[in-house]
């Protein structure tokens, strides 16, 4: 009995050792499998069973994202927010100022206004002027001044005469400018693509097709650049338009002076009427001749008809 009991005890120990070995092997294999799975999917198994995600950089994506393959991507964004580029505002500013000066004062006002604009780095874009029947000058002066000096120049010019009205307008073109920049980058990429295809063309037809597409892209690219340059100029230099009217002397505001101005206006109207009749005189003479000839022809025809009826 003692020998049989000893043999059973040895068998039990052997079975226990075999089961322990199988469990140990299975556990090691499961962990190794999980580690391989985590490495293939870009995840890391940490102690305590927590799973943390780890981004995997592929060779095709590494160049686009600015990181090399095999390197961990590090976030440069500050805690609590993302680092976004600040949008540079593009604002076009224009102003319209109506001024009144004494008779003969426009020449001095123009000189001072141009001097103020030139001192700020501006220039005269356009000018038109004329005199009325009383010798009063009415003029429009367009100035371009740097945007950062716009307010100062406008204040200086407003002191040169009596301000009748003043209006300042601003136009924000930031959104349009951002769209143009995006279009320009896209067109540049298209241009590079077609340029790379030129050396790979295998026939004349392919070369012609590539050249046509490339020309269209380059033309659109130049149009976008031209629009961007125009907006840059409009933003950099503000437009100030001055409308200047000379007024008569204070002594011209009496009753008899008003009557005199009324008679002068009547005389100007009468002169215009006479001048119009003078220009219309040749046509009036021609019409009168046609009427007279028609009248005599009709009378002569009626006379002949009456004679024939009498006979």
Image (tube, rainbow, N blue to C red):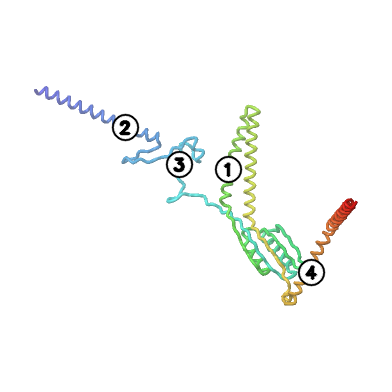
Q: CA distance from mark 3 to mark 2?
A: 29 Å
Task: State which mark lies toward you, 2 or 4.
Answer: 4
Q: CA distance from mark 1 to mark 3?
A: 26 Å
The residue tagged 3 is 73
Which is more N-terminal, label 1 or label 2?
A: 2
Question: Residue at 44% across / 40% down in the picture?
Answer: 72
Q: Badges 4 and 1: C-beta atoms under 8 Å apart?
A: no
Q: CA distance from mark 2 to mark 4?
A: 114 Å
Other residues around mark 1 within 10 Å, as few (<14) / some (14–19) / many (≥20): few
Question: Residue at 79% across / 69% down in the picture?
Answer: 267
Tell which of 64 and 30 is nearer to you: 64
Q: Percent position (x, y) of residue 227?
A: 63, 48
Q: Describe residue 302's horizontal placement relative to residue 106 as left or right.
A: right
* Placement of the N terminus among the 4 image quadrants: top left
Q: Check disc 4 and report its element: helix, strand or loop.
A: helix
Q: Percent position (x, y) of residue 21?
A: 25, 28
Task: State which mark lies toward you, 3 or 4.
Answer: 4
| Rendered view: 309 above or below 21 | below
Q: Check disc 2 and report its element: helix, strand or loop.
A: helix
Tell which of 141 and 114 is nearer to you: 141
The residue tagged 4 is 267
Other residues around mark 4 within 10 Å, as few (<14) / some (14–19) / many (≥20): few
Other residues around mark 2 within 10 Å, as few (<14) / some (14–19) / many (≥20): few
Q: Check disc 3 and report its element: helix, strand or loop.
A: loop
The residue tagged 2 is 30
The residue tagged 1 is 185
Q: Badges 3 and 2: C-beta atoms under 8 Å apart?
A: no
Other residues around mark 3 within 10 Å, as few (<14) / some (14–19) / many (≥20): some
């Amino acid at each position: 009995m003692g020998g049989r009991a000893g043999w059973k005890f040895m068998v039990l120990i052997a079975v226990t050792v075999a089961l322990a070995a199988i469990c140990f092997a299975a556990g090691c294999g499961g962990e190794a499998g999980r580690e391989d799975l985590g490495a293939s999917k870009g995840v890391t198994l940490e102690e305590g069973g927590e799973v943390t995600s780890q981004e995997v950089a592929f060779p095709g994506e590494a160049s686009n994202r600015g990181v090399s393959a095999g390197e961990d991507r590090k976030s440069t964004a500050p805690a609590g927010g993302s680092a976004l580029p600040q949008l540079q505002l593009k604002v076009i500013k224009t102003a319209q100022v109506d001024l009144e000066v004494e008779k003969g004062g426009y020449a001095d006002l123009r000189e001072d206004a141009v001097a103020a604009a030139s001192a700020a780095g501006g220039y005269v874009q356009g000018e038109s002027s004329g005199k009325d029947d009383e010798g009063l000058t009415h003029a429009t002066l367009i100035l371009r001044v740097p945007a950062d000096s716009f307010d100062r120049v406008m204040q200086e010019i407003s002191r040169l005469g009596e301000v009748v009205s003043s209006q300042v307008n601003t136009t924000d073109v930031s959104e349009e400018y951002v769209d143009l920049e995006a279009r320009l980058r896209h067109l540049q990429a298209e241009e590079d693509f077609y340029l790379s295809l030129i050396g790979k063309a295998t026939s004349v037809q392919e070369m012609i097709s590539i050249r046509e597409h490339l020309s269209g892209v380059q033309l659109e690219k130049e149009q976008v650049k031209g629009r961007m340059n125009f907006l840059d100029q409009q933003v950099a230099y503000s437009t100030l338009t001055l409308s200047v009217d000379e007024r008569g002397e204070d002594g011209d505001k009496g009753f008899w002076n008003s009557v005199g101005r009324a008679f002068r206006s009547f005389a100007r109207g009468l002169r215009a009427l006479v001048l119009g009749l003078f220009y219309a005189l040749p046509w009036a003479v021609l019409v009168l001749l046609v009427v007279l000839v028609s009248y005599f022809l009709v009378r002569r025809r009626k006379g002949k008809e009456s004679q024939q009826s009498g006979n």
